[in-house]
Image (cartoon, rainbow, N blue to C red):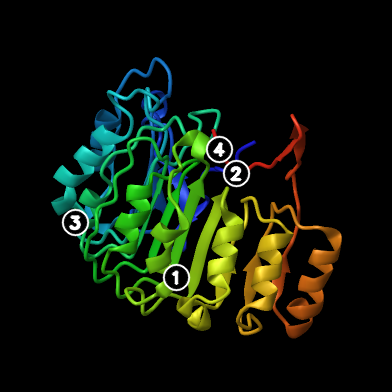
């Protein structure tokens, strides 16, 4: 099961699919600044690579007015010799053509196109360096993902979606200087798909010293969600948050108890814990303690099913492969 779905909007704009090669010239195009443009190719046996599709896009659209771009499916995204690197290379080379670009998302593929942990990523911080005016940035896929410690003065939203996030990526985000960042959403994933981070890697984020503007924090899809919850219970950053998302991971009553017995969370507008392993009594405690105080809660257990094998209970994150 995968929660990775195509983006429907970016930068407050609806996502519009730039026509594939076979449909070129048959679709009426909207104004350049009216939509977020998703540029894709066929996944298998495509007649053109992503750079060629992007060249058609640049020839058809006034790129100086484009405000949001999304890179979609590309041929052999699962290939460690290709993946999304050609798209990143192309965008970096084309940066001067996009003076109005404010939002960028890399690797917007659903499971039918490429499973999230099969998407071969690259050093995405090259894009933040190439586009210093970006306000929103996101990427999907953890294989080969690199996020170096960077300084970016304008970025307000950062989203990294993986089935397994390398620890060096978490540390790179934590060490970055992002003074304008309001939203941070990390899908940490599971060890089975390369998620080797630990709570110590997340600690600088929870300290919040480098994130003075943060209002939304998502540390989710993690197989050490209980440890995250325990750390959140006393984390300095929490006091200035408006929303907190610890969903999609392996959150049990141990983590739930830590959250409820830690610092007050009644100032939050919303707390998202969906896909959890909380007992019914624990869910009721959240409703009594936080729901009654006006916090919007998502406690939907969803498909978080447990397996028992060889005397051990196995629990799973929402998004792995």
Crowding near pointer 2: few (<14 within 10 Å), some, many (20+)? few
- Of callouts 4 and 3, which one flags the residue occurring earlier in the amino acid sequence? 3
Depth check, mark 2 against mark 4: the one in front is 4
Crowding near pointer 3: few (<14 within 10 Å), some, many (20+)? some
Residue 18: which quarter of the image? top left
Please report the residue visible at 39 percent of the width from the left and 75 percent of the height from the top: 208
Q: Which mark is residue 129?
A: 3
Mark pair 1, 3: CA separation? 25 Å
Out of 104 and 230, give the one closest to the viewer: 230
- Of callouts 2 and 4, which one flags the residue occurring earlier in the amino acid sequence? 2
Depth check, mark 4 against mark 3: the one in front is 4
- Of callouts 2 and 3, which one flags the residue occurring earlier in the amino acid sequence? 2
Left of 59 or right of it: where is 77?
Answer: right
Image quarter of the C terminus? top right
Which residue is identified by label 4? 320
- At mark 2, the secondary structure is loop
Residue 38: which quarter of the image? top left
Depth check, mark 1 against mark 4: the one in front is 1
- At mark 1, the secondary structure is helix
Mark pair 1, 2: CA separation? 25 Å
Q: Position of residue 98 (x, y in %)?
A: 21, 54
Image quarter of the N terminus? top right
Say above or below: 211 vs 319.
Answer: below
Left of 119 or right of it: where is 126?
Answer: left
Which residue is identified by label 2? 3
- Of callouts 1 and 4, which one flags the residue occurring earlier in the amino acid sequence? 1
Which residue is identified by label 1? 206
Depth check, mark 1 against mark 2: the one in front is 1
Out of 229 and 99, give the one closest to the viewer: 229
């Amino acid at each position: 099961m995968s929660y990775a779905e195509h983006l429907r909007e970016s930068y407050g704009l609806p996502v519009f699919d730039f026509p594939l090669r076979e449909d070129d010239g048959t679709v009426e195009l909207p104004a350049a600044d009216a939509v977020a443009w998703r540029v894709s190719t066929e996944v298998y046996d495509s007649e053109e690579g992503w750079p060629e599709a992007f060249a058609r896009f640049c020839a058809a659209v006034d790129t100086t007015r484009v405000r949001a771009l999304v890179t979609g499916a590309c041929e052999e995204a699962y290939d460690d010799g290709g993946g999304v690197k050609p798209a990143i290379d192309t965008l970096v080379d084309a940066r001067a053509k996009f003076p109005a670009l404010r939002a960028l998302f890399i690797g917007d593929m659903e499971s039918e196109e490429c499973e999230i942990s099969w998407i071969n990523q690259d050093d995405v911080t090259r894009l933040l360096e190439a586009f210093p005016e970006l306000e929103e940035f996101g990427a999907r896929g953890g294989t080969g993902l690199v996020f170096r410690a960077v300084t970016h003065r304008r970025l307000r939203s950062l989203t990294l979606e993986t089935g397994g996030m390398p620890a060096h990526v978490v540390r790179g985000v934590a060490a970055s200087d992002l003074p304008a960042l309001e939203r941070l959403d990390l899908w940490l994933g599971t060890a089975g798909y390369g998620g080797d981070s630990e709570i110590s890697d997340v600690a600088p984020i929870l300290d919040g010293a480098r994130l003075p503007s943060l209002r939304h924090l998502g540390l989710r899809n993690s197989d050490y969600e209980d440890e995250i919850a325990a750390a959140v219970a006393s984390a300095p950053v929490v006091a200035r948050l408006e929303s907190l998302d610890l969903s999609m991971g392996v959150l049990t009553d141990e983590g739930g108890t830590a959250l409820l017995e830690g610092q007050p969370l009644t100032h939050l507008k919303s707390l998202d814990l969906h896909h959890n392993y909380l007992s019914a009594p624990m869910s009721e405690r959240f409703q009594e303690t936080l729901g009654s105080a006006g916090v919007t809660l998502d406690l939907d257990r969803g498909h978080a099913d447990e397996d028992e094998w060889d005397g051990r209970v196995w629990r799973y994150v929402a998004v792995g492969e």
